[in-house]
Amino acid sequence: MPHLTYDLKSYRNYLRFSYSKHLLVEGRDDKRAFLLLLEDHPPSSQNIQVDTAEHLVDFGACIGNRQKVEEVCHSAIDSTWGTKLTGFVDRDFRGFAMRPHLEDRLQRHRISNRLVWSRGHSIENYLFDVDILQKPLRMFSPTDTYTDALELFVALFHNTVRLACAVSLTGNELQKLGLVKSSISRRVLRINDDCTLILDSSIWKDELVRRHHLCPERAQELTDTFLLWQHKVEQCDFDTVRWMCHGHIGLAFIWSAYSRCIAESCKLKGWSEQEAEKEAQRVLKTEERIRFRACAETWVDMAANRQSCFPTEVLTLLDVGHHLASPDRTHMLHCPNTASL
C-alpha cells in the first residue's frame, strides 16, 4: 500500500480494483516479518502486497489497529474481492485462562474466514526460541566475552521467559503495560550463585518511584502483584508461558537479561563493575527495530528449514504456503493446525 491513508470505504475500493493479493497486518513489525517470509518464497509471493492498519483512518469509534484489521476482514466476507484479502492480527491475551491456573485453551493458530490470529500474544512470541535468538544476540555483542555470556543466557532462557511472562501479566492486570515495559532493565535483574535469574522487586520498586514517578503505594502494588503472578507462572508448563507472554515486553526483557549476562561475564573475567556495566549497555545501543529484524531474519531462515513455528495458515491463504510445513514437525513445535472460530 502506498503511504496514503484510507478510510474503510476507500480501502475496500482499493482492494476491489487491485490486481494483487493483500495481507493486512497491524503494524510495522508485523509487516517486516511477513515481508521476510514472503521474500523466501518467490515467485509465488511476487504479486502480494503487505498493508498495515496504521494507514487506515476514520473508523468512527476510536479503535486500535487490531480492531481495524478485524473490521476490514469482516466486511470482506462474501464480497467479490474477499479472496484477495488475508488478515493477520495479534492474539493478545485472548484464549488464555488466567484463573484458577494459567492455561492455553487454544494451543494453535485460530482462523475465522480469512483472518488469522497469531499463535501467541503477538508476532514477537515466534522469536522466543533460544535457537532463534543465539545468532542475533551474538551479532550485537561487542565484546569477546559474548561466548560466556551466551552460554549463561542459554542456561537462564526458560527462567527469563517465565519472569517476562509474570511481568507482562502484572502489567495487563493493572493496565500498566507501557510502564512495565519501560521500567524493566538490566538494573532490576540479578543472577544468583545457583545460576537463576531474579527480578529484584525492591530495586524495581525504587526504579518505579525514582525514574518513573510512580507513587510508593502504586509501586508496591505493582511489585506485590508481580510476586503473585510469578508463583502462578512457575506452576505452568513452559509452552503456555512462551505463548502467553506479552510479545513486546518479552522481547525487551530478553535483551535486558542478555545484557545482564554480558555484565556478569565481564566481571568474572576481572573487569571492574563500571567497565562491565558500560560494556553491557553497548549491547542495547542498536535500535529495537533493527534488533527485531535480526531476530526475525533468523526465524525466517529456520522456518524455511522447518525448524521453527510460523503462521503457515497465512501463507496458505495467500497460495504460497501449502508446501512449507511438515505436519509432524509442526506438531513437535507446538504450532499445530488451525482451529476455526
Image: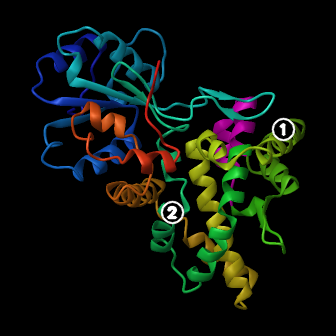
Rendered residue at 20%/33% (across/down)? 2
Relative to 280, residue 79 above or below? above
Q: Counting residues from the N terminus, which is met first, the one under dot 1 or under dot 2?
A: 2
In this orientation, does residue 277 appear? Answer: no
Pinpoint residue 278: horizontal percent, then vertical percent.
64, 76
Q: Is residue 89 magenta?
A: no
Pinpoint residue 256: horizontal percent, then vertical percent.
64, 61
Mark 1 lies on a secondary structure that is helix
Location of the N terminus by quadrant is top left
Rendered residue at 37%/30% (across/down)? 54
Q: Amino acid at mark 2?
A: Leu
Taking depth in this image into account, of 131 and 290 the one nearest to the observer is: 131
Q: Quadrant of residue 106?
A: top right
Q: In the drawing, does residue 162 fall left or right of residue 341?
A: right
How many residues crowd mark 2 within 10 Å: few (<14), some (14–19), many (20+)?
many
Q: Which residues are magenta?
A: 167-185
Relative to 199, residue 232 above or below? above
Relative to 293, residue 339 above or below? above
Q: Is residue 168 magenta?
A: yes
- Disc 1: which residue: 225
Q: Quadrant of residue 274?
A: bottom right
**Dominant secondary structure, magenta:** helix
Q: Amino acid at mark 1?
A: Thr
- Disc 2: which residue: 133
